[in-house]
Image (cartoon, rainbow, N blue to C red):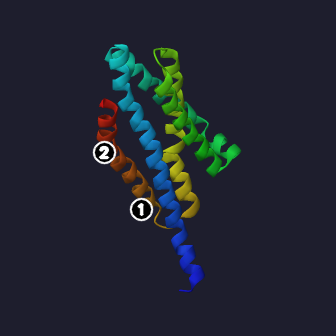
Amino acid sequence: MNSISKKQAIYPWLVMCAAVVMCICASLLGGSFAISLSCVRNELELTGAQTGVFTTIRTFSAFLIVLVFDKWFGFLGLRKGIFAGLLFGAASMAIFSFAGTNLMIYNVGAVFGGICYGLCLMAAASLVVKKWFNKSRGLAIGICSAATGLCNFIFSPLIQSVANN
């Protein structure tokens, strides 16, 4: 194998590592969303059903964004589309941080979180893997999926402890 073919063999795996980082970032933003809801519930003295509405809004907006997924990435391209999705996630966390007692602002944060979830998790990772892998696609997407689950397993208790203190 010459050096050019080694680069060609390694580059898709580097791209897959970037997809793992993307999934971890989106998962952290989404995981933080769920953890922040307990703080919102305690601070505003809401019931579980009332705070569950935020999760429903996030999930529904993620579903809606997946319906226009192809058009989004066709218009912006893969890199810009993923970056914009992560910006929606960051905006969601900022909105939850500064919303105060206005419940409508929390709804906007939930919509932004859903857009991040829909654009930046496994569907986007599968686009990246599809573009760069001819072989071992299943392994690459499995690694991205495992990283998302592992991220939630490791970081959720850490974020919860930070939120409680």
Q: Which mark is residue 139?
A: 1
Question: At numbered mark 2, what does the secondary structure look like: helix, strand or loop?
Answer: helix
Residue 77 x, y percent position in the rendering: 67, 49
Q: Which mark is residue 94?
A: none
Give the residue drawn at x 38%, y 19%: 51
Any part of residue 62 in sight: no
Q: Quadrant of residue 165?
A: top left
Examine the rendered structure and indicate whether residue 70 appears above or below residue 163.
below
- Near mark 2 (Cα within 10 A), the count class, few <14, some 14-19 or many ≥20, is few
Amino acid type at circle 2 is Phe
Residue 65 x, y percent position in the rendering: 57, 34
Give the residue drawn at x 55%, y 31%: 64
Amino acid type at circle 1 is Leu
Residue 42 x, y percent position in the rendering: 32, 19
Question: At numbered mark 1, what does the secondary structure look like: helix, strand or loop?
Answer: helix
3 sits left or right of 146 in the view: right
Label 1 vs 2, first from the N-terminus? 1
157 sits left or right of 147 in the view: left
Examine the rendered structure and indicate whether residue 46 appears above or below residue 118.
above
Residue on which disc 2 sits = 153
Residue 118 x, y percent position in the rendering: 52, 38
Q: Are marks 1 and 2 in contact (CB under 8 Å)?
A: no
Give the residue drawn at x 43%, y 59%: 138
